[in-house]
Amino acid sequence: MREVVAVAAAELYERLPAALAGAGPALLPDGPQSLAGPLSPDEDSAGDPTAVVVATSGSTGAPKGVLISASALVASAEATNKRLGGPGRWVLATPARYIGGIQVLVRSLVAGTVPVVLDLADGFKVPDFVAAVDEVCRTPGRHYTALVPTQLARIVAVPDGLAALKRLDGVVMGGARLSPELREAATGAAVVSAYGMSETASGCVYDGVPLDGVEVKLVDGRVAIAGPTLARGYRNRPDLTAESFVDGWFVTSDLGRFTADGRLEILGRADDMINTGGVKVPANAVERVLERHVDAACVVGIEHPEWGQIVAAAVVGTAEIDRLRDLVRAELGAPAVPKVLKTMIALPLRGPGKVDRAAVRHYLSQ
């Protein structure tokens, strides 16, 4: 019986080949010991071994362990390499304990290249990124990286950073929504917005178009995904697996729609819809208005005895509170105006670029 073994993320590149081949244990990078141990028969397969277990960055409760098979990881890597223009050498700029970082390693293994790994012990630093790009570009061929929006914002704010970014043949953006303003600030760089999660072995929809082999549909407004990149399910949670993986489809908690040209557009999470006084306000829509005038924003619903819920927002950056409220009112109507609006030095994170909404909600409730 194969086991799940907790390993340091720094060991992943060396140990992944054996895990992908089924010759070694499934790897749990920097994950909790509660997810380690023997795999049950429905969590593994001799013909397609579970290679990695990724602890999701949930903001409440114990993290879920996503079981990802070797075939799903490789299918994602090969489809990404193809979409970007062919195999290449990567700069690993995000933690390898998350699926985005893991996939940089898998793409490198599939391509037969060695990634340049940033030292993130003291956080992400633009000069280190510039140096890594310089190193990777000394190798002939194509050159890539994967980032989250907070990293991209720091890079484009520095001339040397933007220049380095433009040297790359592909910059895969994940972790959080890429705003139009930030994308415009990176004009000239080969930026691709990726949508996906651990359950889909990383990004599986690039700039609204599914990778080869991936299918997307809407189920009651929610995005559902099928194809060879799907995870096997959740570690020790057959109930959650049965609930989320239905007839070959993974039903997400994200709301979406298809644009006129058939591209998938993510509207926000289903549980981020705020019902205030009987009016449904999408938190994502309010965030988009605010983000055009501040550095960052997070909008949540707070329970209220009269309204049921009220719209509350935390923003980062200098702005007049009353003016922000007027801007939201003018674009989205009075129900969408945040009744609570506070500033923060920085939004709390619970993963690579993902805002900890529970922490924001607690802060705004005080």
Image: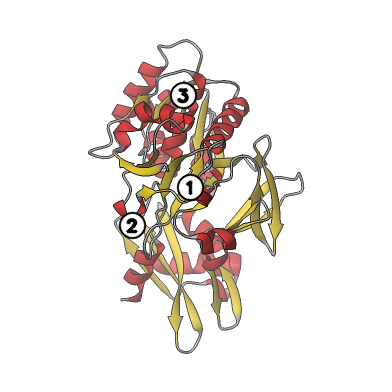
Residue at (48, 29) in percent of width and height: 21
Determine whether, in the image, residue 7 is placed left or right of residue 87: left
Residue at (37, 33) in percent of width and height: 93
Residue indicated by mark 1: 67
- Per the model, the C-alpha gap separating discs 1 and 2 is 27 Å
Q: Dot 2, crowdedness within 10 Å: few (<14), some or many (≥20)?
A: some
Percent from the top left, x then y, of residue 164?
A: 41, 24
Residue at (50, 68) in percent of width and height: 326
Residue indicated by mark 2: 348
Name, please, the residue furthest toward the left. 122
Percent from the top left, x then y, of residue 111?
A: 51, 20
Ranked by sequence position, the earlier of labels 3 and 1 is 1
Percent from the top left, x then y, of residue 10?
A: 30, 33
Q: Dot 1, crowdedness within 10 Å: few (<14), some or many (≥20)?
A: many
Residue at (38, 37) in percent of width and height: 94
Residue indicated by mark 3: 109
Determine whether, in the image, residue 354 is placed left or right of residue 248: left
Name, please, the residue furthest toward the bottom. 306
Disc 3, SS: helix
- Per the model, the C-alpha gap separating discs 3 and 2 is 33 Å
Tell me where residue 150 sits by quadrant. top left
Q: Nearer the viewer, residue 82 or 137?
A: 82
Disc 2, SS: loop
Q: Dot 3, crowdedness within 10 Å: few (<14), some or many (≥20)?
A: many
- Per the model, the C-alpha gap separating discs 3 and 1 is 20 Å
Label ID, residue 186: none
Q: Amino acid at mark 2?
A: Pro
Determine whether, in the image, residue 16 is placed left or right of residue 270: left
Percent from the top left, x then y, of residue 51?
A: 46, 38
